[in-house]
Every structure is written in structure tokens, then in C-alpha cells.
Image (spheres, rainbow, N blue to C red):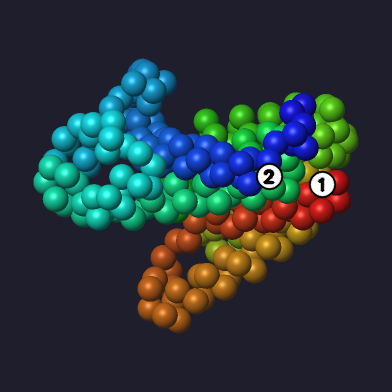
């Protein structure tokens, strides 16, 4: 464990913000490439993600290193490609900024402790899952299943909850949404959610135990209803347009993580 008492708090938070920007840039790239590579059944997935250079999605021009500085490069170029002058989506700086703020908050609450490092990984994976689900209506097993197993592994040391609670949390989390899915399908003939949601809730149960599931589901349900009906009321989305549920589950899990920091 690294003691935070020997580190100036302002220096630690500034460093955390910079790390968050760098990780946010990676998450931005990963969330863009990963679903496309998997849908194309890319045989060299890891190689494609790790060594493939960043390019402008419009003109395919490879970006030099000084155009890849998180957030600041986008601001310096005024949100446009330096080659074709096409607007660059605001998704990139928003993801970088959100990851940076999240990283600072986790370090501030948990410090550089085992729980803090675990909370950072948890938060970064949830951000990646949420972005992909929003953009593709898809929760990838390659993200949700490692998150589930990591939750079980860290709780062998009772980092967040005892292992037996984590195991029950994973099992009940999956079964709850599985039963809801099939009940809804039986009554309406329609599918109300995807199997990825089952696995994500199972992962959250593995991290925080079965007792946390009602809170996570309540937060996810209420916020999804508010956003869903709010979008219809403001005519931003059609009533029958599918709404990704993964980000709301992720929000419930993250709120549970933040609330847990107050109990340390």
C-alpha cells in the first residue's frame, strides 16, 4: 500500500487528473474500436487495439503524437481535424474529462489503497461498458465477464464484501434480470433487454454483494425512466426507441461504490 500521508494532496489530485485524462483517451479509443473489431471478427484483436495508430475517422489521416494530447489537442484544434478540417466529435474530450473527474474523485475518497486501485479499475471498466452500450446497444462479454471475475477475486480478501455475499450477489444479480427478461417476453412476445444486462448486474453483485442489488436496480430503474420519458417529452427520442439499460446499471453500481467509501 502506498501511504498518501507523505504526498501533498494537491499534487496527488493533479497527478490523478492527468492519469485520468490519459486513461480517458485510451477508453475513448477502446470504446470506438472494440465493438467494430469484434463485429468484424478481427483475428488479431489485441494487436489491432494496441498498435493501430489513431486516425481521423473522416479523411483517414494518421494523427501525429502532438495531436493526441488528451483534451488539450481537441481544444487547440478547436474541435477540427488538422488535415481535412472536419469537426471532431465532442465524445472524445467528454470521455477524457469524465474519466479524469472520476479518477480524481476515487483517489480523493479511497486514496492509494487496495480498495482505491480496485475502485479505479471498476470505474474505468464501467465507463467503457456504458459508452459502448450507448453507442451500439451492446454490452460485451470481454468487458463484463472479467469485471465479474475480478469482483469475486478481490472479495476473496473481503475487500468490499465477504466472498459468500459476492457469490450470492453474482448469482442473484444474473437470475433477477433473467427472470424479468423471460417474464416480459412471455407476456408481450418482446425482448425488454439484452443478456449483457444480466452479466453486468451479476458483475455488480460480485463486487458489492447481494444486499446491494436492490439499491442498484432502484437507481437504474428510476434514472432510466426519468431519462427515457424525459427524452420522449422533449421529443429527443421516439417512445418505442430502445434505451440502453447498461449505463443506468453502471450508475447504480458506481453510486454504491461512492456510498461505500463513506463507511471506511
Q: Nearer the viewer, residue 145 or 46?
A: 46
Secondary structure under tag 2 reads helix
What crowding class fits label 2: few (fewer than 14 Cα within 10 Å), some (14-19), or many (20 or more)?
A: some
Q: Residue 201's x, y, as percent?
A: 67, 46
**Front-most of residues 86 and 243:** 86
Q: Residue at x 74, y 28 (%)?
A: 2
Cα gap from disc 1 to disc 2, whole angstroms: 35 Å
User: In this picture, is 262 found above or below 29?
Assistant: below
For this view, does 256 lie left or right of residue 11? right
Of badges 1 and 2, nearer the viewer stands 2
- At 34% from the left and 21% from the top, the residue drawn is 51
Does 83 sit above or below residue 262? above
Question: In what element is the residue under mark 1?
Answer: helix
> Which residue is identified by label 1?
210
Q: Residues within 10 Å of mark 1 (few under 14, many from 20)?
A: many
| Labelled disc at residue 9 | 2
- If the image is split into quadrants, where does the N terminus sit? top right
Amino acid at each position: 500500500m502506498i501511504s498518501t500521508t507523505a504526498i501533498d494532496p494537491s499534487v496527488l489530485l493533479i497527478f490523478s487528473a492527468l492519469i485520468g485524462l490519459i486513461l480517458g483517451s485510451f477508453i475513448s479509443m477502446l470504446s470506438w474500436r472494440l465493438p467494430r473489431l469484434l463485429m468484424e471478427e478481427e483475428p488479431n484483436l489485441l494487436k489491432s487495439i494496441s498498435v493501430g495508430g489513431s486516425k481521423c475517422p473522416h479523411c483517414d489521416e494518421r494523427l501525429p503524437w502532438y495531436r493526441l494530447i488528451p483534451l488539450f489537442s481537441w481544444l487547440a484544434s478547436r474541435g477540427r481535424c488538422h488535415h481535412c478540417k472536419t469537426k471532431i466529435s465532442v465524445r472524445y474530450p467528454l470521455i477524457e474529462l469524465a474519466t479524469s473527474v472520476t479518477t480524481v474523485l476515487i483517489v480523493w475518497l479511497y486514496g492509494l489503497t487496495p480498495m482505491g486501485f480496485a475502485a479505479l479499475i471498476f470505474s474505468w471498466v464501467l465507463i467503457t461498458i456504458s459508452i459502448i452500450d450507448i453507442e451500439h446497444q451492446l454490452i460485451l462479454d470481454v468487458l463484463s465477464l472479467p469485471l465479474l471475475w475480478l469482483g469475486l477475486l478481490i472479495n476473496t480478501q473481503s475487500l468490499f464484501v465477504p466472498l459468500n455475499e459476492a457469490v450470492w450477489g453474482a448469482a442473484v444479480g444474473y437470475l433477477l434480470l433473467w427472470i424479468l427478461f423471460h417474464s416480459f417476453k412471455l407476456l408481450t412476445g418482446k425482448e425488454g433487454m439484452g443478456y449483457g444486462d444480466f452479466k453486468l448486474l451479476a458483475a455488480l453483485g460480485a463486487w458489492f454483494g447481494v444486499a446491494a442489488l436492490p439499491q442498484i436496480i432502484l437507481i437504474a430503474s428510476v434514472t432510466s425512466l426519468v431519462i427515457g420519458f424525459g427524452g420522449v417529452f422533449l421529443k429527443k427520442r421516439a417512445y418505442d426507441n430502445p434505451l440502453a439499460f447498461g449505463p443506468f446499471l453502471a450508475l447504480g453500481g458506481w453510486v454504491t461504490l461512492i456510498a461505500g467509501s463513506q463507511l471506511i
